[in-house]
Amino acid sequence: MDIQIKRGLLDVCVLAAIRSEDSYGYKIVKDLQPFVEISESTLYPILRRLEENDMLTVRSAEHNGRLRKYYHITEAGRKRIADFTEEWKEIKAIYEFVTREDGTNDKK
């Protein structure tokens, strides 16, 4: 898969993983695991980028004597998810065009 496409998809997946409640890195990886393969080493740069783009905020809290970073989605992050769902309609149409079996350009 094209790296830029995958990068954009992973960003939206991470935002979706935290849209209903704040979460931390390890839990985000586990929540995404049934849907997409992502490692912690891939996740943390995504989280930093999303924070830099104001799509999430970070707070630290003590958990079992250690500091843990919790990520919270912002309105900009929610808007990115909404934008993605609109973009998906176009992506789906392109996919259907590319994978059609009869070879015609007729739209269904």
Image: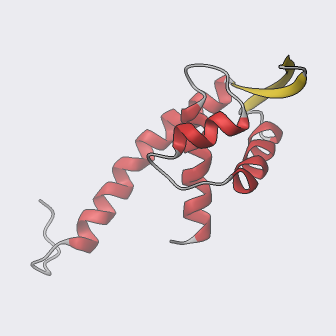
Q: Position of residue 6 (x, y in %)?
A: 56, 61
Q: Position of residue 31 (x, y in %)?
A: 54, 37
The quadrant in which residue 48 appears is: top right
5 or 104: nearer the viewer: 5
In the image, residue 80 above or below residue 22: below
Query: Would you say 100 lies left or right of 35 here?
Result: left
In the image, residue 46 above or below residue 7: above
The quadrant in which residue 17 appears is: top right
Q: Residue at x 36, y 54 (%)?
A: 90
Q: Residue at x 40, y 49 (%)?
A: 88
Query: Would you say 75 lies left or right of 88 here?
Result: right
Residue most extreme to the front: 64
Image quadrant containing the C terminus? bottom left
In the image, residue 11 above or below residue 51: below
29 or 90: nearer the viewer: 29
Q: Position of residue 79 (x, y in %)?
A: 58, 31
> How many labels, in total?
0
Query: Would you say 70 lies left or right of 5 here?
Result: right
Q: Residue at x 83, y 41 (%)?
A: 52
Q: Residue at x 50, y 71 (%)?
A: 1
Q: Position of residue 21 (x, y in %)?
A: 60, 19
Query: Would you say 93 lies left or right of 5 here?
Result: left
Q: How is the protein colored in the picture? A: secondary structure
The quadrant in which residue 93 appears is: bottom left
22 or 107: nearer the viewer: 22
